[in-house]
Image: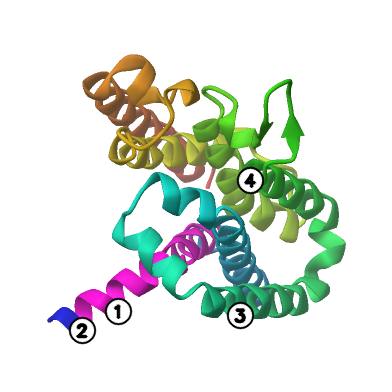
Amino acid sequence: MKFIVKILDFLVASNVYVSLGVVSLTLLSLDIRQIEHPNLLWFVFFATLFIYNFIRLVNIQFTISKSATIRHRIIYRYKRFFWFVCIISAVIGFYFFLPISQFIFLPIIVLGFVSIIYGLPIFKNKFHLFRLRDVPGLKIFLIAFVWSYVTEGLPALINGEPLYYLALFERFLFIFAITIPFDIRDFNYDATYLSTIPQYFGINTAKWLALFAILSCELILFYRFFSIMIST
C-alpha cells in the first residue's frame, strides 16, 4: 500500500496527473466535433508536462524554503530526474507540434509566452522581481484562460472552425471552479498580497463561487446540447 501511495505522490509531483487532465478535456472537445487528432493530444500532454515541470523546478529553491509539503520535498529530492523529464517533454512536444504548427502556431506562441511569464520572476518593481502569478487576483483567471483556450480553442482551430466564445466561456467557468479548491488548499501557504479568491472573499464564499461557476457551466452545456439537437 505504501508503494502505491509513493507512486501516486510521484505522479502528482511530476505533473503527469495535470497533463492527463488537460489531455482529457482536449479529447472531449475533439470528440464533440467527432474528429481524431492524436498529434494534438500528444502535443498538449507533453507541452503541459514541460511547462508545469519547468516552472516548478525554476522556483523549487524558493518554494521549498517557504513550505515543506510532501510534493515539494519529492520535487526537490528528485529534481535532476524532473529536469530530465522536462527536457524530454520539450523535445517530444516539439516533435508533435511540427505537423500541426500551421494551424496553431501563433496561439501557441502567445499561450507559451503567457505560461512562462506566469511562473518566472522576470518583472521588476522598486523592491523585487515578481511573477505574473504574483499580481493580486490574477492567478486563477490566467490559469482558466490558458486551459480553456488550449482544451477548447485549439481543437476548433485544428478543425478549421472559428472560435466559439460560448464554448470557451463554458470551459473557462469549469476550470475556474475546479481551481478554487486548490486555492483553498494553499490558503495557509499563499502570500496574503496574492488576494486569491479564498483570501479575498473567505473560504465559504469561495466554495459558493465554485459551485455557482459549475452550475453556470452546466447550464451553458444544457443550452448548447439542445441547440444542436434542435438544429439537427
Q: Nearer the viewer, residue 70 or 23?
A: 70
Q: Please provide percent x and percent y for residue 52.
A: 56, 59
Please name the residue that numbered disc 1 is placed on: 7
Q: Please provide percent x and percent y for residue 152.
A: 59, 50
The N terminus - image quarter: bottom left
Magenta region, residue range: 3-29
Of labels 3 and 2, earlier in sequence is 2
Please name the residue that numbered disc 3 is placed on: 84
- Residue type at the position of mark 2: Phe
Q: Is there CB contact under 8 Å for labels 3 and 2? A: no
Question: Where 210 sits versus 20, above or below?
Answer: above
Between the C-alphas of marks 3 and 1, the distance is 18 Å
Between the C-alphas of marks 1 and 2, the distance is 6 Å
Is disc 2 surrounded by few (<14), some (14 to 19) or many (20+) residues within 10 Å?
few
Of labels 3 and 1, earlier in sequence is 1
In the image, taking residue 208 as reference, residue 220 lies left or right, namely right
Between the C-alphas of marks 3 and 2, the distance is 23 Å
Is disc 3 surrounded by few (<14), some (14 to 19) or many (20+) residues within 10 Å?
few
Between the C-alphas of marks 4 and 3, the distance is 28 Å
Q: Nearer the viewer, residue 134 or 66?
A: 66
